[in-house]
Amino acid sequence: MKKITFCLLFFTMSLTTIIAQTYTPTEGNLKSRKEFQDDKFGMFIHFGPYSVLGNGEWIMNNENIKVTEYGRLINVFNPQDFDAKKWVGIAKAAGMKYITFTTRHHDGFSNFDTKLSDWKITNTHFKRDLLKELADECHKEGIKLFCYYSLLDWTRTDYQYETGKTGKGTGRTQKSDWNSYVRFMKGQLTELLTNYGKISGIWFDGHWDQLDNDTDKTLTSKVNWHYDEIYTLIHSLQPDCLISNNHHLLPIQGEDFQAFEKDLPGGNTTGFGGQSVSQLPLETCETMNNSWGFDINDRKYKSTKDLLHYLINAASLNANFLLNVGPMADGTIQPEFVQTLKEMGTWMDKNGNSIYGTRGNVIKPQDWGVFTAKDKTLFAHIIKTPAQTDYIFIPEMKQKIKKCYLMDSKKEVKFKQQPEGTFVYLNGIKIDEIDTIIEMQIQ
């Protein structure tokens, strides 16, 4: 993935002349952005008829399943064991503050009672509006609800599939009708923002399906996504609602936070990153194994330690961590995920003060760990055993420390500040396997 170039700047500037140029966030929207940054930890949920096949959410595309064949899943997708209270309870016990739910993924299936499509959950044997039950429980428990919404569609004939990169093998032959598809999306977004109470954010995905070249993000989309109309519609219906778009580009006007996929901001280990980091609130999303949707063969589970380190590193870079679960077809979250999330919640109960409400990018990462900050407090997270086991060194630290102690025990820790940096002494301190947190009160 290339770093930002003049072409990308020109592209972005050109877009801003078209897209929501007059957008000015409301006071409530700015408040929502701050709360979002404070929340730090959320649950991503990928769920739909693909869960029945147990091979991830891209199976329709990957196996070139025809629309008529894939559509038969409506007769067997029946999440009879779904319990919104259990889903929300698992998220809450993990210390998560919001849920981002796939209201509609790339297969076009709607997990809500839309009036604009028959390809929806209320037409399965389940019959109920899953999103409504989830929204009601989130509102009851004080968990914010974000709606993932796919911009692309592998089943609808009016989607511009001729120029799209994915969903080529689904058997569609009828000529697309882009204006019809845009009207459909605007209609569904209106339903989501009208019928389900407060929606804290809309999380778009799929813009990349219409890029001219996946490896050169300086090129424009093949279609006009009508973001000016779509973003204006969202903010007019719910001004406090935050908008993000997983387009792997710099944010454009009308967007309220920047999303990163399977990488920390600025990183690009997966090929999805590499874009510059904006001044908007940030979020990175990741899976608990290697899959978003339920995959019965995916046993590559990330450890509690690794996921907590991801969360800590994200916070140190001023980003939220959106951690995904892919429930099984019966509507339950698999026990391996539940156990790990429970362990993360135990850690957050004890150490969450060093994550929630903090800001990052205060001091550069060190070989031994990273920093978060809140008001007049710095948190040094020792997540790797220091090279010098009796101290850590913080170079070029400008802040003056008044007091230094272990966060968990409040035991005072000796320190020495010199022009070249600060020494924090670890004599008698046992380094925790996950994170030893040194709390520093600064002037």
Image (cartoon, rainbow, N blue to C red):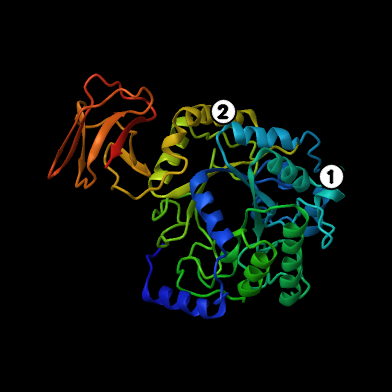
Is residue 332 at all visible to an observer of this figure? no
The foreground one among 280 and 43 is 280
In the image, is residue 81 above or below residue 283?
Answer: above
Q: Amino acid at mark 1?
A: Arg
What is the quadrant of the N terminus in the image?
bottom left
The foreground one among 279 and 63 is 279
Residue 128, disc: 1
Residue that mark 2 sits on:
342
Is residue 39 at all visible to an observer of this figure? yes
Image-quadrant location for residue 434 = top left
- Horizontal arrangement in the rendering, residue 126 relative to residue 215 (left or right): right
Residue at left offset 72%, top offset 68%: 186
Q: Secondary structure at mark 1?
A: loop
Residue at left offset 72%, top offset 66%: 185
Marks 2 & 1, CB-CB < 8 Å contact: no
How would you rate the neighbour count of disc 1 (Cα within 10 Å): few for under 14, some for 14-19, many for 20 or more? some
Which x, y percent locates residue 203? 61, 57
User: Which one is earlier in the sequence, the residue at label 2 or at label 1?
Assistant: 1
Which x, y percent locates residue 140? 71, 40
